Structure formats: C-alpha cells, structure tokens
C-alpha cells in the first residue's frame, strides 16, 4: 500500500498541468481579450523578474520554449513580508498551491511538454516581489520529491518557524532524478545506493546587512541564494545531513537581522545537485503594532542599558579605587543574571554550542564554569591586577551592550547566547552563528581601546597606592577611636548623629514656614 502511495503522489505531480502549445495559445488569447483586471507575465528560464503585486489582483504567468532535456522546473516568488499565493490552478487547491513570503512550486514535465502556466496573487496588500524559474535535468536530484507529509505532491519549499531563542527550518526529503517518461523512484525503499538514501543535504546561511530592513536590499540579496553555484559561493555552510538524519534543524535567532537559508541536495552517484527554494526571516514581525521589527528595543530597556553602560565606563577607568562600587556593579550583574534565569524558568514570562559534545547541558555548563574560573586562578597571586583587569573587561563590555540598543552588533551575543541557553531547554541543539560585519569591526576596536586604556590608566593611577583601599569597617573603627582620644581633632566636636538629624529636620521645617511680617505686632489702643 505504501509503495502505491509513493507512485501515486509522484504521478499526481507530473499530471496536474499538461499544457500543449495550442492550449496555451488559446489561454493567452482568452486573457488578452477579456476585461479582467488580472495581468499577464512571461518568464524566461533562469532570469529574475520583478513584479509589483496588487491586492486581490491575480497575475497569470507563463513560460514557453522549455528545452527537451529539462525534466522539471522550480518556480519561486519572494516578498519581504507579504504572504503571496502561488498556484497551478486559477482557483487554488491544497495540492496545487502554496502561500507564504517565499512560495515555490515544482513542476514535473511530461514528454514533449514545452510550456507551463501558473497564477500569482497577493491577498493582503501591495508589495514588490522577484520571481525566477530554474530548470533541472533527469540526472539532478528532485528537491522535496519524497514529501509524504505535505499537501503538495512535490514540496521543494523550506518551512521556517522562529521564536525569541531559535529559528527552526525543515524541508521534505528529496528523491533521485528521473526522465520525463520514467516512473518516479519509490521513496519508501529502506536502503540501497540506487535510491534516495544516497543523497546528502548541505545547509547554508546568508546574513543581510546589519540594521538594514529595506525591501530593496532583501530582494537584491535573495538573488545570491537561489541556484546551487550562487548558494555555495555566497552562503555560509553550516553543516551537512545524511538521508538518514532528520530533515529539521534549529539555529539561533537574531531579532531584527535578516537571514536567508537554503538547502542544497547532492547526489554523489550522479555528481549532481539541486537547490531548494530559499527562505528568509528577520525573527520579528513587520506588521505588528507593538514590538515590530522597527521598535524592537523598548524605551525602558534602552534606559537600563544606557545606565549600565555609563556605570561600566566609570568602572573601566576608576573601578579599583572605588572598590565598593566595583563590587556592587559586578555583584549586580551576576545576581541579576541568576535571578533573571530563575524567574523566567519558573514563571510564565516572555521575554558557541555548535560542537555536538556541548549539546549536553552538563558538559556545557561544566566547561563554561571552568573557563570562567580559569582567569581568576591565573591571577590569584596578583589580586590588584585581577581587579583592574576585571574592571576594564566588564566595564568596557557594558558600554558595548549599551551601544547595541542603538546600533546592531554581534558582540552582544557573546552573553545573549549564554542567556538563551540558560532560559530555553531546547536551545542546546540549536546551531549558533552570527555575522561579523562593519559595525562589529568598529565596535570591537572601541571595546579593545576602552579595555586597554582603562587598564593602563588604573595601573598608572594605582602604582604608588596600597594594593586595595582600606577596609570600610576598619576605617570607621580607626576614626571613632581617634575622635574619642584626640580632643584637638575637629571631628571630636561633631554632634552625635541623633542631634544632627534633629537639626536637619528643623532646618527643613524652617524652609516651609511662613515668614512673619515685620513691624508693630500689638493692637492699637483707642
């Protein structure tokens, strides 16, 4: 029964749209003579074409002169955030259409079929889009050719979901290539080098320019992640999957930064490859009224991090001399981190582990703690050097976190990814990768300059001073003894704190007392 289902699904994909040249000519004449507001677009193989979508207006697209050696074509359309419906039928059905920001359809061609037609529509708003049709031959693997869990008979799309912590991409398994007139190979064969189990999948990632949310930039960069050669030349290879692996992976999400993902399926037996339909995300919502892609950083968050950054700048240059302020600042960071994790993990609040061994939480946290304790152990015999180094490092990084609220930088994810790991139990399996672009080069230079200058300044300032400022309790105790024994000390004549508080309250009351008028105060005698 399962074998028949595999053949039936593949057959349905190839027999859904047989278009002869005569039928295509009739359809074109009918569209040209009708008074319908829909548009008509002709495409060329491998050529990108810009489309201006209009709300509730259907565009009819067609392709002619398909070469005989082309076995199947992949049709794909991309918009920034507007959902678009791509369909083989005028009235979309579940097994002949798909809706999304990066929809795509794969069409298996019949013998002697050299033309195709499909329909495109935006149901929500106007938008700019790009579209392209890629051809493949019988030796190339078929992306999504074994999509037994999808409504589409052949699903070459990459499906993406995201949250605050991670983005999950999933795709249907591919099938080996076959000729136009051949029966598609079965997908449920358990093993064998002649079946789909010899295929491999490479996952690629491409970062858009930081802080750039424009539609024009996205559509231009999407063209670099469409076919196999462009994907391998421009994308960042993340990892490979075998046919036995689960076709679903998780990567760390970066809200506000555009990322494009694509999958290249390779057939080692034929030495050929094919690309899935790329998908993009900003890990945020463009249409939400609150917390959208343009207003990710709240005012309260910016005020908090700016305050932390200013205090960090003070600690970077003066932390060792003002030891109590240093201890308060660093203690606040560690306790704040700890309590934030505990609160989020226990309450319903919404607010590089790339090596497989670090997917285990015990291994990760033991390694993280060991590295965190390594620096104090190295400087254990030099406590002043350790204190000044800590002030410089923590204080300068706090400045970088404050800048991150206004200018995107990947340096912030040095700590944010650790926080995500502590908050989300599933983040241990997510692949973490962040871009390193011009903003990061500038800010890492600023970080190094602050770190070095802060340490040099404090070492120079403290070279003739004691290792640490005196203990506050010992200082208070010594001053009290001096006041009691030295009658000539001016502090000996300072009133007790109770009298000083009473005098202060009296002075404050006098500020608000109504001034009495000057002159005669007794009544006049008649």
Image (cartoon, grey):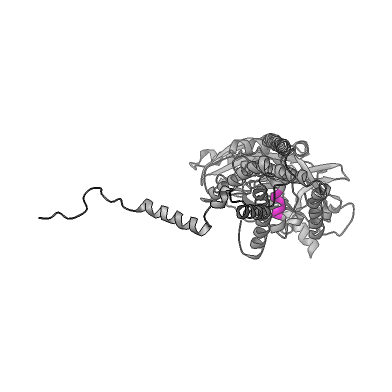
Residue situated furthest left in the rendering: 526
- Can you give x and y, in whole percent of width and height, for residue 463 in the image? 74, 38
Quadrant assignment, res 364: bottom right
**At 68% from the left edge and 34% from the top edge, which residue is drawn?**
442
Question: Which stretch appears magenta?
Answer: 415-420
Q: Position of residue 226 (x, y in %)?
A: 71, 40
Residue 154 visible here: no
Q: Is residue 478 visible?
A: yes
Q: Quadrant of residue 505?
A: bottom left
Picture layout, residue 324 above or below residue 70 = below
Query: What percent of the width, then of the height, locates residue 228?
Result: 77, 39
Q: Return the x and y of residue 519 as percentages of the image width and height.
A: 23, 48
User: Can you tell which quarter of the image residue 68 is in?
Assistant: top right
State the residue in front, 517 or 30.
517
Q: Is residue 467 magenta?
A: no
Overall secondary structure of the magenta section = helix
In this view, the residue in front, 128 or 439, is 439
């Amino acid at each position: 029964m399962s074998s028949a289902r595999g053949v039936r699904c593949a057959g349905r994909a190839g027999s859904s749209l047989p278009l002869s040249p005569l039928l295509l000519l009739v359809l074109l004449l009918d569209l040209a003579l009708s008074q319908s507001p829909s548009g008509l677009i002709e495409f060329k193989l491998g050529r990108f074409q810009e489309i201006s979508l209009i709300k509730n207006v259907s565009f009819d697209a067609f392709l002619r002169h398909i070469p005989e050696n082309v076995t199947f074509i992949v049709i794909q359309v991309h918009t920034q955030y507007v959902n678009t419906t791509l369909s083989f039928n005028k009235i979309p059905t579940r097994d002949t259409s798909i809706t999304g920001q990066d929809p795509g359809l794969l069409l298996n061609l019949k013998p002697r079929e050299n033309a195709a037609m499909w329909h495109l529509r935006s149901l929500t708003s106007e938008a700019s889009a790009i579209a392209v049709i890629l051809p493949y031959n019988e030796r190339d693997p078929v992306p999504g050719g074994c999509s037994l869990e999808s409504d589409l008979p052949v699903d070459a799309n990459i499906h993406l979901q995201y949250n605050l912590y991670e983005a999950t991409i999933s795709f249907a398994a591919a099938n080996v290539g076959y000729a136009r007139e051949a029966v598609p190979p079965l997908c449920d064969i358990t093993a064998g080098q002649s079946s789909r189990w010899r295929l491999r999948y490479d996952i690629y990632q491409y970062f858009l320019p930081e802080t750039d949310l424009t539609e024009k930039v996205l559509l231009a960069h999407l063209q670099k992640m469409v076919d196999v050669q462009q994907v391998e030349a421009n994308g960042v290879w993340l990892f490979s999957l075998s046919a036995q692996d689960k076709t679903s992976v998780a990567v760390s999400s970066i809200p506000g930064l555009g990322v494009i993902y694509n999958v290249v399926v390779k057939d080692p037996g034929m030495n050929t490859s094919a690309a899935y339909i790329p998908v993009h995300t900003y890990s945020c919502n463009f249409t939400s009224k609150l917390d959208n892609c343009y207003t990710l950083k709240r005012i309260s968050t910016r005020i908090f991090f700016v305050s932390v950054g200013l205090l960090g700048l003070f600690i970077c240059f003066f932390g060792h001399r003002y030891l109590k302020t240093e201890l308060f600042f660093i203690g606040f960071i560690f306790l704040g981190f700890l309590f934030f994790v505990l609160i989020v993990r226990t309450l319903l609040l919404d607010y590089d582990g790339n090596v497989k061994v670090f997917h285990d939480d015990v291994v990760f946290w033991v390694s993280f703690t060991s590295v965190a304790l390594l620096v104090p152990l190295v400087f254990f015999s030099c406590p002043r050097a350790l204190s000044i180094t800590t002030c410089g490092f923590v204080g300068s990084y706090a400045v970088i976190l404050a800048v991150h609220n206004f200018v995107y930088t990947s340096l912030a994810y040095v700590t944010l990814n650790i926080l995500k790991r502590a908050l989300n139990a599933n983040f241990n399996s997510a692949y973490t990768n962040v871009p390193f672009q011009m903003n990061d080069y500038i800010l890492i230079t600023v970080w190094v300059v602050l770190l070095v200058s802060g340490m040099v300044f404090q070492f120079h300032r403290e070279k003739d001073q004691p290792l640490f400022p005196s203990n506050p309790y010992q200082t208070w105790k010594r001053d009290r003894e001096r006041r009691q024994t030295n009658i000539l000390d001016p502090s000996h004549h300072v009133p007790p704190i109770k009298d000083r508080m009473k005098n202060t309250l009296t002075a404050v009351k006098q500020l608000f007392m109504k001034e009495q008028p000057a002159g005669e105060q007794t009544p006049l005698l008649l």
